Image (cartoon, helix red, strand yellow):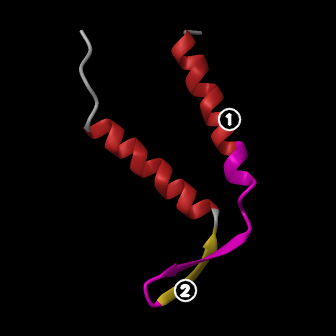
Amino acid sequence: MKPKAIGILIIMVLFLIILFQNIEIGSWRLFFWEVRVPRILPLLAMFFLGFVIGAIFQRDRP
């Protein structure tokens, strides 16, 4: 395996561990509303948002 693939695998395993430790319900206050969602949903949303932004702004390396 290439070192980059090993690094990505380690990061994904750590990410999954963090996700599954945050399954309990949390509340978020959004302006006038209070939303009760599992803490895993905002973490997943931020992960995918970061992935999309990284894919859009990736640099071409020579």
Asked which secondary structure carries label 1, the reply is: helix
Residue 13: percent from left, percent from top: 68, 35
Tag of residue 56:
none
Mark 2 lies on residue: 34
Which residue is pictured at 69% across the width and 47% down the height? Answer: 18
The image quadrant of residue 3 is top right
* Left or right of residue 55, residue 24 in this image: right
The C terminus lies in quadrant: top left
Q: Earlier in the sequence, mark 2 or mark 1?
A: 1
Q: Is residue 34 above or below residue 55?
A: below
The image quadrant of residue 55 is top left
Q: How would you rate the neighbour count of disc 1 (Cα within 10 Å): few for under 14, some for 14-19, many for 20 or more?
A: few
* Left or right of residue 42, residue 15 in this image: right
* Left or right of residue 36, residue 62 in this image: left
Q: Amino acid at mark 2?
A: Glu
Q: Report the Cα–Cα distance between label 2 and label 1.
A: 32 Å
Which residue is pictured at 57% across the width and 63% down the height? Answer: 41
Residue 30: percent from left, percent from top: 46, 80
Q: Amino acid at mark 1?
A: Val
Q: Nearer the viewer, residue 48 or 27?
A: 27
The image quadrant of residue 1 is top right
Q: Which residues are magenta?
A: 17-32
Mark 1 lies on residue: 13
Q: How would you rate the neighbour count of disc 2 (Cα within 10 Å): few for under 14, some for 14-19, many for 20 or more?
A: few
Q: Are marks 2 and 1 in contact (CB under 8 Å)?
A: no
Q: Is residue 21 magenta?
A: yes
Residue 52: percent from left, percent from top: 35, 45
Asked which secondary structure carries label 2, the reply is: strand
Which residue is pictured at 54% across the width and 86% down the height? Answer: 34
Which residue is pictured at 52% across the width and 16% down the height? Answer: 4
